[in-house]
Every structure is written in C-alpha cells, then in structure tokens.
Image (tube, grey):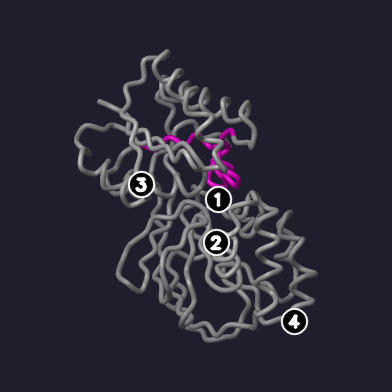
Amino acid sequence: MTIALMMNLKAGLGRTNRLADYVFQQFELHGLPYVFVRGDSAQDAINKVTARISEFSAVVAVGGDGSVHTAAQIAIKHKLPLGIIASGSGDDVARACGLPHGRNLEATKLAVDHFVNAWKEKDLTEIDSLSATTSDGQEHAVLAVMSCGFDSRVNANSAKMTYLTGTGRYILAMLKTLTRFSPISYHTVIDGKESKFDAMLIAIGNGPMFGGGMKVCPSANIKDGELDYIVVNKISIPTLLAVFPKVFTGKHVNHPKVDEARARTFWLSAPGEQVWGDGEYLGESPVQIEIRPNSVSIYGVRW
C-alpha cells in the first residue's frame, strides 16, 4: 500500500518548495512507497486523493497547519493514519503532538527524518479531533483550535498578510482588527445548557495553541476526550490589549473576565460571524461542535 503525500509547495512562504527535494530523497532512500499529490487548491487535493483512496494506506501532510487540516479531512473520513511533516509558519498541530517543527530548512529536515523513522517503526498514537458542522451543513475536522469572534476576524485579516509569517502576522492583524471591533452577541448551548451573552471571542480547543504557539486554551489536551473552551467576556479595548500578551504563556485565563471550562458538545450562534479552525476559514455560524475521541492516528507523537 502507498502513502498519499500531500505537499503544498507554497506553504511556509515557499519553505516547503525548498524542502521537497529532501522529502523525495528520504522517502526513496528508505523505501517509503508514495504518490505525490499536488492540488490547485485544498479541495482539489482532497478530490485527487479521494479518487484513488483504495490505493492508500496513509496520508502525509508536508506544510503548515492549513496543509495538515486538509490532509486530516481525508484521514479521518477514510480512517487512515496521518503523518505530519511541519514546515509552516505556525505549526500548532505539530506543537500539540510534540512533533518537530521550525522555520528553517534544517528544522524541517528533522521533521522529515522523524516521520520516516516513525513510519518504519509503525509508531502511531490515536488522538482526538473536533467535528464542526457549519451553517452550510458541511462537516469539518479540526485538530487544533476553533474560534468565532475577535480571533476569527483577526484570522481573516491575517490571511491577507502573506508578506509576514507566524505570530508577527497575527499581532499586526490583531491591531488592525481592534480599530473596528465591538463586543459580539453570542447564543450557546454547551452540553445542553443554554446561554446568551456579549463577549469578545470564544475559542474551542482540541489542542492548546493557535497563531504559532499562543496558548489560547492552555489546558487542552489532544487525547483527553473533551474539548476545552475559553470565553473572553465583554471588556474594554484597552483591557483586551493588556490581557492579550498573557496568551503566550496561557495566563490570560486567570483574568476575571476570562472563563475556561471543558465540554463534549458545543453549539454556538453569532449572526454574521465567521468560524475558523486550524487557521482555516470553515464557514459562518451557527456551528455545532463535538469531540471525537481517538478519531485519528498520528505518526511519531511525543508527549
């Protein structure tokens, strides 16, 4: 059986393109059977792999969180193990799994070598995922963090800033978003309990990090069978700016206006607001989210 090697050569501002030769070289040197799948878009790549799904025994993503998100849709739907060779600017899924990551070529070569060894040793660990059904009825698998509100608007602005990388791009997008932001009205049903309130953002984590290592859901664990969420309740913009730097250490959850909890099901409505997951646009609210315990096997997970 063969590996579906999904590689976005534009990921990591072209870093993956420079890494491609090393990937091919190592796969061939160690006898890993593969088919390189290159799509014109995420959906095109999914379609190309799906058309030949009976040939594949694993899916491997080379790139950033967007590439991993795309490959995860196939892996989870078709119950195939997932390999992650992190070479993006954020790599939050790789961070949550304890996998090698970095923004230089030598670091990403280590990620290749780590996967090759894990594949040869059949080193697989089952982790959880989030299942998110957006207002258009589409179901999405999310491995890291979902958001709706301030952060989803930041993501939308960040996606346009392709000339920057990682956390720096996120911070600049955040400052731009603040200039026109006001609290959002939310309607939620969490494990059957209904609430309506105004808040700045809601983030729901399978893993703890978004934005290139920011610990937005610091207690989240990819293998605990629960989703973690935070709500940043209605606060002033200056207070939001004061709280924000603490997200790098996860200490923002100690602020009295930040709620942190766990659940298994989470329904959320915020009319007109976008929903993002793994740094990718998923759709608009309302969104129904559920935890899927042990729903995907990952190569080489380290705790």
Provide the residue designation for mark 1. Answer: 221
Q: Give the residue type that dot 4 points to.
A: Ser
Judged from the image, the secondary structure of the residue bearing numbered disc 4 is: loop
Cα distance, mark 2 to mark 1?
A: 8 Å
Q: In which quarter of the image is the N terminus?
A: top left
In percent of the image, x 59 and y 33: which residue is there? Answer: 100
Say left or right for 120 vs 54.
right
Provide the residue designation for mark 3. Answer: 40
Provide the residue designation for mark 4. Answer: 236
Characterize the local packing of mark 4: few (<14), some (14-19) or many (20 or more) Cα atoms within 10 angstroms.
few
Please name which of the two marks, 3 or 4, marks the residue nearer to the observer. Answer: 3
Please name which of the two marks, 3 or 2, marks the residue nearer to the observer. Answer: 3
Say left or right for 167 vs 268.
right
Percent from the top left, x then y, of residue 170? 65, 58
Q: Give the residue type that dot 2 points to.
A: Asp
Residue 20 can be seen in this image: yes
> Residue 18 has which mark?
none
Cα distance, mark 3 to mark 2?
A: 34 Å
Mark 3 vs mark 1: which is more N-terminal? Answer: 3
Q: Give the residue type that dot 1 points to.
A: Asn
Provide the residue designation for mark 2. Answer: 228
Cα distance, mark 4 to mark 1?
A: 30 Å
Query: Which span of residues is magenta-colored?
Result: 81-100
Characterize the local packing of mark 3: few (<14), some (14-19) or many (20 or more) Cα atoms within 10 angstroms.
few
In percent of the image, x 39 and y 55: which residue is there? Answer: 141
Pointers 2 and 1 in contact (C-beta within 8 Å) = yes
Mark 4 vs mark 2: which is more N-terminal? Answer: 2
Q: Nearer the viewer, residue 100 or 258?
A: 100
